[in-house]
Image (cartoon, grey):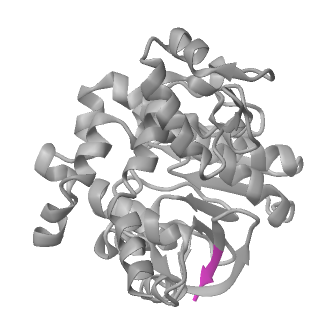
Amino acid sequence: MRSHLSAQLWQIATGHLLPRCLHLVAELGVADHLGDAPATAEELATATRVSADALDRMLRLLATVGVFEARGNRWAHTDVSRFMRTDHPQSMRPYARMIGSPLFWAAAGELGYAAETGKAAVEKLNPGGIWPYLRDHPGEADIFDAAMTARSNSDIAALIPAFDFSHYGVVADLGGGRGRMLSAVLAAAPNVKGILFDRAPVVAGVAPTSRMSVQGGDFLQDPLPTADAYILSRVLHDWTDEEVGAILRAVRHHAPRHAELLVLESILPDSSEPHHAKVLDILMLIITGGRERTEHEYRRLLEAAGFRLDRVVSTAGPVSIIVGVPA
């Protein structure tokens, strides 16, 4: 029994090596160089300009969790590894590249700083935090943007079948980036109009359409649009409770009495079971200084800002829709 427990701790202590292999395979684009026919490590290494022996050993570790499959002396795709291809409609390659990028990987090594100070670990590496860093490092910013698009694609695939937007007249997506999610909502509900709201530099290149208007602004400082529903997708977890309170109060101030607030986030369970949100919570701790929250914590924040938590709608993915209504 003791040897089993010690092996469990050994696996946890060395667990960073598996994702590090995934990061590198994503960065190299190995999955893109592997087609329907199996290929040798030598062939893949030649295509990606790395050591065949080192790549073979990394693929061997990844195969233990179903990422690629060994077939004799060749490697083949699995259903999981196909998500690492750039051309997959729900590609996770950009997200893996982001997590393995210099800033994100280094920030994980500074978790102790977050433990000591309660601040985002990334602030030890870049005192201004992640957003000024990305502004000054356009290459990593491109990776970050691609990762956010990949995550949005995954969330959209789970959201649209789970929630009916057709009974709203106007939907505003606050912090909606370049409008991918709002565009999907409008495609699913042809009678609805939308307003994309985000910082002016973010929406500068987004062309409005007959059904989607575009408004640049800061939701903590500028007037928000009038709508029947307000989407906050993966926004609140970037911020502290105090900052979330300010965001929610701003929405409540501008929202009509009948409007609904749709908060899309991963909800922390109260139990100790493994859960996607618990990993994401540590990522927020090291990168943004924000956090994931339980349903009770979201209820408390909504109530303090003048909303009432009406219902929580689950989806097939890790994101849930927390529906708030004016209290």
Magenta-span inclusion, residue 128: no
Nearer to me, 13 or 222? 13
Name the quarter where the N terminus is drawn.
Answer: bottom left
Q: Can residue 303 be seen in this view?
A: yes
Q: Is residue 47 left or right of residue 305?
A: right
Magenta-colored stretch includes residue 326: yes
Q: Which secondary structure type mostly characterizes the magenta part of the structure?
A: strand
Which of the pair 76/200 is nearer the observer? 76
237 displayed left or right of 183: left
> In this rendering, is residue 142 above or below 302?
above
Q: Tell me the quarter of the picture where residue 60 sits.
A: top right
Q: Image point 60% across, 12% down: which residue?
A: 43
Q: Which residue is drawn at 31% across and 70% down?
A: 240
Tell me how many marks there are: 0
Image coordinates of residue 268 in percent, x first then y, are 51, 78
Name the image quarter holding the C terminus: bottom right
Where is residue 45 drawn, in percent x and y? Answer: 51, 16
Q: Position of residue 10 (x, y in %)?
A: 35, 67
14 or 147: which is nearer to us?
A: 14
Question: Does 265 sit above or below residue 153?
Answer: below
Seen from the viewer's position, the closer of residues 210 and 14 is 14
Residue 162 in the image, given as x and y percentages of width and height: 81, 65
> Over which residues does the magenta segment extend?
322-327
Residue at screen point 42% across, 73% down = 8
- Residue 177 visible? The answer is no
